Amino acid sequence: MRAVDIIIKKRRGEALSKEEINFFIDGFVNGSIPDYQASAFLMAVCCNGMDSWETVDLTLAMVNSGEKVDLSRIKGIKADKHSTGGVGDTTTLIVAPLVAACGVLVAKMSGRGLGHTGGTLDKLESIPGFRTNLTMEEFINSVQTAGLAVIGQSKDLVPADKLLYALRDVTGTVDSIPLIASSIMSKKIAAGSDAIVLDVKSGSGAFLQSLDDSFALADAMVKIGVRAGKRIMAVITDMDQPLGMAIGNALEVKEAIEVLKNKQSGPLKEVSLYLAANMLLMAKACTTLEKGLAIAGKALESGKGLAKLGDMIRSQGGLEEVLDNTDLLPKAKHIIPVKTDKDGYVSSIDTREIGICSLLTGAGRSRKEDEIDPAAGLVMQKRVGDKVQKGDTLAVLHTNKSDIIDEVSNLLRNAFHIKPEKPKLRPLVLGTVTKDRIQKFV
């Protein structure tokens, strides 16, 4: 078997066998297949796609390229969630404690932010003392004692994904549904949880802006999960505007705490409860979505979700007192309101541009090695559909960089599109995908 023959076969649009895919991934990881052949393979997949069986075989070959997390020592069903990334997407900090408060263990490996999307690890690390680099023994102990843990991915977990993604990033092959699906699901499968809920974002701030592409990705990932023996479903949610009002690490932690204290309503709370209910359903903690929503809602209103967040912070070395005093979180020197010069209604928001504004304040990174400022970011004051008058504050910048204030203020102001007519809002949840059906709500 030769790598070049596999590349030619996929270039012709033919389906690859499991043996061919395993040969190629094994060879790439052990160094016998060079980068230039792997790049050609990725381009052939990007141009010609893969069928569902090929995508499953690619995913499992990537899973088997490294270590797998064994959670069998932890009794009961272990649940996980994954978001494809967005702006103001603080759901993990709300959903994981709520699900744990309802008696379902949450064992989650998360990533860092890159580009305009925020990373859960960066948010949690804005809590003084919080550790995301737990050993596997510490991770398991935290899940057993606190009911949940969120840590970074081990370097030995799915090495094929790290190597392939580095090439995809520089060869223009990131935007391929089989490659995206296999990248995400290889890590979810290797992480060892039994029940998985995928939050696939769609809209101007999402990785995939097309609704059709979002459903196609969700369907591909669910098929992979089912064939890997996981209880899995996907929720397609709106990212045509930021989900939460806060964008930035410490700011998002503060907002998550406010939601868990039941002091803040709105889209972030609604989507978090919906995701939590589906996690409970996948973990067999309820029999219907309606019951799951009721159970999760009760955990929020009773304060049990907030208490679980405190348990996780304490077990991972963080300062639990931030729950009572969010002033203990990092704060920026410059807090600048950005005002509108127009009258009308917010008709739409360029959500990607909002994410870029947050990045420029210091809250994000353009490259993986960039340092972030946990205090930086912005807090939205207006959402799509809100009426505004000249002089109203659209958002408030938080930054320690005085030299970017004017530039970011102008970018932020231009990201809000204001028109005379009130716009029609699209739903927060755009549909769901399970092993049995695809439901579209729009």
Image: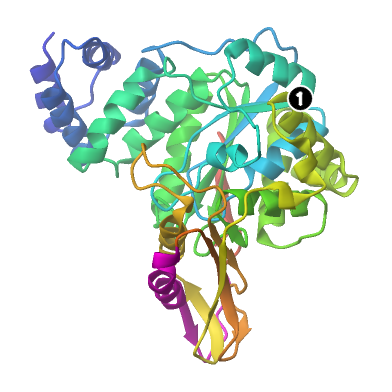
Quadrant assignment, res 141 = top right
**Looking at the rendering, in which quadrant would you find the N terminus?**
top left
Is 210 above or below relative to 84?
below
Is 168 above or below relative to 331?
above
Q: Nearer the viewer, residue 344 or 20?
A: 344
Give the magenta part as a residue range: 402-425
Q: Is residue 286 visible?
A: no
Judging by the rendered image, the residue that carries numbered circle 1 is 147
Secondary structure of the residue carrying numbered label 1: loop
Quadrant assignment, res 210 = bottom left
Q: Is residue 67 visible?
A: yes
Q: Say left or right for 101 vs 42.
A: right
Give the image location of residue 100, x and y in percent: 77, 31
Residue at the extreme right: 302
Q: How busy is the neighbourhood of tag 1: few (under 14 within 10 Å), some, or many (20 plus)?
A: many
Q: Which residue type carries mark 1?
A: Gly
